[in-house]
Image: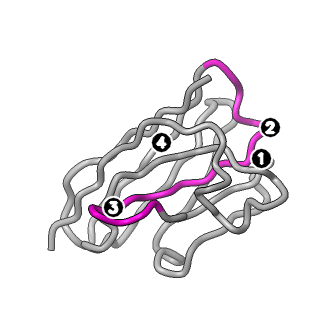
Amino acid sequence: VQLQASGGGLVQAGDSLRLSCTASGFTLDKYAIGWFRQAPGKERDGVASIKSGGGGRYYVSPVRGRFTISRDNAKNTVYLQMTNVLPEDTGVYFCATLPSSTVAFINPTEGNYWGQGTLVTVSS
């Protein structure tokens, strides 16, 4: 059972980037998924989350309107489309399964299955 985040890289402020979270060993369609990020020297914070059916999507205030979370259960993948990125979006991005009952809180302490992260660096 493993999640793998990918798609990170070095971009400039104002650019767009799409991250992918792919599962191996299990299917994602029954799980709520969250995206989290950890900036250098800081704790891991929630970014966005999505219910298993895709009907509910949640964002933290700093990214609302710029980031979009979506999922393609046929591809066993959850995406995080990042637009108009800012230097403060820099960090390692992780995806994790979340309890469906608390998915809206995007709480990293409730993440169950985690994948290795992908580094996003935004230059000014």
Residue 83 position (above or below residue 98): below
Mark number, residue 114: none
Q: Residue furthest toward the right?
A: 101
15 sits left or right of 28 in the view: left
Disc 3 marks which residue? 16
Which badge, 1 or 3, is on the more N-terminal residue?
3
Q: Amino acid at mark 3?
A: Ser
Q: Residue at x 58, y 63 (%)?
A: 48
- Determine if the magenta segment contains residue 30: yes
Disc 2/disc 4 C-alpha distance (Å): 17 Å
Disc 1/disc 2 C-alpha distance (Å): 5 Å
Please provide percent x and percent y for residue 81.
Answer: 47, 57
Question: What is the quadrant of the N terminus in the image?
Answer: top right
Disc 1/disc 3 C-alpha distance (Å): 25 Å
Which badge, 3 or 2, is on the more N-terminal residue?
3
Q: Secondary structure at mark 3?
A: loop
Mark number, residue 30: 2
Disc 1 marks which residue? 52
Q: Do tag 1 and tag 2 residues touch (Cβ < 8 Å)?
A: yes
Q: Nearer the viewer, residue 21 or 99?
A: 99
Which badge, 2 or 4, is on the more N-terminal residue?
4
Disc 4 marks which residue? 20
Please provide percent x and percent y for residue 37.
Answer: 43, 58
Please provide percent x and percent y for residue 95.
Answer: 53, 46
Disc 3/disc 2 C-alpha distance (Å): 29 Å
Q: Nearer the viewer, residue 122 or 73?
A: 122
Q: Do tag 3 and tag 2 residues touch (Cβ < 8 Å)?
A: no
Q: Amino acid at mark 2?
A: Lys
Disc 4/disc 1 C-alpha distance (Å): 16 Å
Magenta residues, start to end: 25-44
Q: Secondary structure at mark 4?
A: strand
- Determine if the magenta segment contains residue 27: yes
